Image (tube, rainbow, N blue to C red):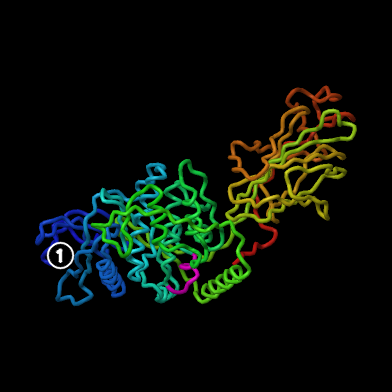
Amino acid sequence: MSGAADEVLGNRYRLIAPVGTGGMAVVWRARDLVLDRDVAVKLLAGELATKPGNRERIRAEAQVVARLQHPNITAVHDYGEAGDLAEGRNGRRPYVVMELLDGELLSNRLRTGLMSWRRATQICAQVAAGLAAAHERGVVHRDIKPSNIMLTSAGAKILDFGVAGLTGSVDPDDERDGTVFGTPAYLAPERLLGGSVVAATDVYTVGLLAYRCLTDRLPWHADTPTQMIANHVYEPPHPLPEIPGLPAEIGRLVGRCLAKDPDARPPAVEVARVLAAATGIHVVLPGEDGSTTQEVHAPVQPPDTHTEPSRGQRSGQRSGQRSGQRSGQRRTWTAAAVLLAAAGATTGMIVWQPWAAKTGCRVDFYIRPEEGGFAERKFEARVTVANAGNRTLDPWVLLFRLPGGQAIDRMDGVLSHRAEIGGIRVTGEEPLPPGKAVTFGINGSGGEPIPPEGFALNETDCDTRISEQGPGSLLPGLTGGVVDAPADEERPPSLRPRRPGGGPPPGEVPPGGPPHGDPDGRGGTHPAMPWPSYGYSTPPAQRTRKRPRVRA
């Protein structure tokens, strides 16, 4: 650990106890022996303190924050270097002296459960106000996330400007040969694609912060840091769900903050005004005196985001996308570093590889013979298709093969279906996001009453489960749209593979007794009621038939 209890730095700051420990720095509670007050002291950890680049970074952070005087930004009091002067500069340990905050990290608060929408908007309004003040002076934080926000009795305080940059300057990540400092869940798209430093980066992360505080989740499904990173660049965020009492303009504002194009996002000062007006609180914005101004800001009505963009706007958007793509091509990805803060201290780095989509699907097939339709061998079925991958499928196409002699008479709940070489091709009515499912219906006839096989969603083999239903039994209802995918325990059980030619295993009697015409239960069939050889499952997909393409 960097530092030791009772050690005195600069003949002034006596270290008391660590309050935050990370892979790159340690934050101590300390006593200012001159002013007789408690302060926070941030020390680079271990051997990192001896590297000139790290020393310069922490010194630059102190200089930047010292110029930002705002009630929602943690104040910096002093900077110094401790150590034995005889060892030269490499033996010196830089430290930053900051105000000691009495409160709770927002990351810890979020772990305790969902907060009210009023509290959520107040916190984010204060964060946006602090960022607006920083942007006014050309400073971009670039690492806004719950663990960098402290909740105090005086309001939210922004911590850790360790990866801050100046507006319009070359992205510091580019100068570090493409290594990105940040947290995967809170990285703006332009930080991954490269380019210059822009204030809109902070607005994007405020949008993520607001979404997380209002819903207790992020606007995408992701299981790994790689998926999180990909979501920022490729996947549109889910709209903010309806929250009782939340003004409609807040949902529209969050959506604008999460725009992929930085130019489409509102400035931080507008974000602060709209969020503050939602609950009538006061925030200090650039040009205002925090000690005297008590104006409650009227809400700013965002433009209608549902309006169809003009041809010129669409052209500009495409131009911006091409520019972002070119910036991304200029950057060579060697690694991504993940910076996790603990009371303003960093914890370390992980390495990730360029993102590739993960595909997967699950199919639950429920089938029953139609009553009175034995002569025509009619059957009815329900098919539940679930996206088990990490990207939205738009469109989604399900392929499967029918047993010999069967035909589809009608299909409900899908956009289209057609028979083609190799099977039936079904196209969905709307996009299928990760973790979501849709159930559609089939009415068919002919052949043996055995279920289809070879299910594949967008050319990826599916984990398929089959459920036999007796005549007159209930089938699952049509969803009429996209719903949450069923949990594993809600799916039909995995059963043994079916026997060629149909029928149960020797000596096994089906539920309800042997079928008509088969008194000994050995699997014989009757012309009017053949033994249904349903009840099998296929293993999860082990391959993707066609290599998926990643859309830029």
Image spot of residue 408 (x, y percent): 83, 44
Looking at numbered disc 1 in the image, what kind of residue is underneath it? Leu
Name the foreground residue: 326 vs 274. 274
Q: Position of residue 199 (x, y in %)?
A: 41, 67
Q: Is residue 191 magenta?
A: yes
What count of labels does the image hold? 1
Residue 473 occupies quadrant: top right
Task: Give x and y (percent) for residue 27.
Answer: 25, 58
Residue 537 is at least partly visible in this image: yes
Q: Quadrant of residue 467?
A: top right
Residue 136: image x %, image y %? 34, 68
Residue in the picture at 10% in, 66% down:
11
Asked whether 26 or 514 is in front, the reply is: 26
Which quadrant holds residue 90? bottom left
Q: What main secondary structure does the magenta stretch of the protein show?
A: helix
For the residue carrying disc 1, how many other residues have a C-alpha within 10 Å: few (<14), some (14-19), or many (20+)?
many
Taking the magenta stretch, the answer to whether it contains residue 254 is no
* Camera-side residue of 217 and 153: 153
The span shown in magenta is 189-196
Q: Is residue 316 left or right of residue 3?
A: right
Q: Can residue 47 be seen in this view?
A: no
Which residue is located at x 46 percent, y 45 percent?
246
Q: Is residue 66 left or right of residue 475?
A: left
Instruction: Give the residue pinned by disc 1.
Output: 9
Q: In this view, does 304 lie above or below 527?
A: below
Q: Is residue 148 above or below residue 377?
A: below
Q: Is mark 1 on a helix, strand or loop?
A: strand
Q: In which quarter of the image is the N terminus?
A: bottom left
